[in-house]
Amino acid sequence: MNIDRNWFITVTTYGSRLPGDKRGFVGYHRPQVDVKSTKRIIHNVVGTDHDADVPALRRYAADAMLGKPTLLLLDQAVALLEQFQETCDYRGWRLWATSIMANHFHVVVGVVGDPSPSDILRDLKSYGSRRLNRDWTRPANGSWWTDRGSKRKLATEESLLSAVTYTIEQEFPLVVWSHCIPELNLPGGLIHNACEQ
């Protein structure tokens, strides 16, 4: 399979990390120094700082929530891994690595051609939601995921390997999986499952 583009996709579960969070967030917002500004900024380039601690934005996002934050369970993470693998196989994408935590997931994916990263993100979220809705009750707020997600282009082999390493070294994962990557001494397959702890 010839890969033309690689992407690092991150999606949080509904309400688990709101825009303005002091732990950091990636998303469009107005600069704090000029609240009347219509200019919006975003920091979503691999290796650069992200935004953090915008209390007014966080309060606004919390007030707009339609229900409690959604957290994934181990069985749901395993089902998502299977769905990500199936979606990537069907689309002709290469799933390099994924880690699924209770409140977010990371996917490193290689694609043929140049599909829109928004389409990649949409497919992962929508097919993931369909799989979860099949076996579990849909969250009361109506969605498993936040509206958007982070889509970072991995333009070099170094950035690809860095994203895979970051993905498989997540703290507190429910499930971690990687494609065989000799440069990282990864044999491929299930690396970690929370049941093993």
Image (cartoon, rainbow, N blue to C red):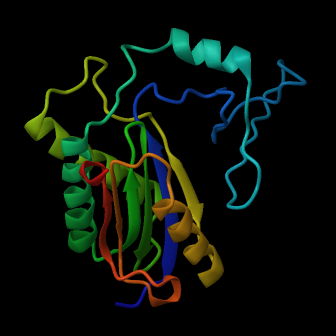
**Image x and y of residue 25, in percent:** 64, 37
* Direction right: furthest residue: 33
- Nearer to us in this view, 101 or 145: 101
- Vertical relation: 30 (above or below) 82: above
- Nearer to us in this view, 13 or 115: 13
**Image x and y of residue 31, in percent:** 82, 30
Is 174 placed left or right of 137 in the picture? right
Query: Is residue 105 visible to us here?
Result: yes
**Image x and y of residue 140, in percent:** 25, 17
- Nearer to us in this view, 191 or 57: 191
Is 90 placed left or right of 183 in the picture? left
- Dividing the picture into quarters, in which one does residue 20 lie? top right
Is 17 placed left or right of 127 in the picture? right
* Direction left: furthest residue: 135
Q: Looking at the image, which residue is at 48% across and 40% down?
A: 148
**Which corner quadrant holds the N terminus?**
bottom left
- Vertical relation: 92 (above or below) 191: below
- Nearer to us in this view, 186 or 118: 186
Q: Looking at the image, which residue is at 88% across and 23% down?
A: 34
Q: Looking at the image, which residue is at 51% across and 77% down?
A: 5
Query: Is residue 119 visible to us here?
Result: no
- Vertical relation: 63 (above or below) 86: above
Is 183 placed left or right of 43 in the picture? left
- Dividing the picture into quarters, in which one does residue 90 lie? bottom left
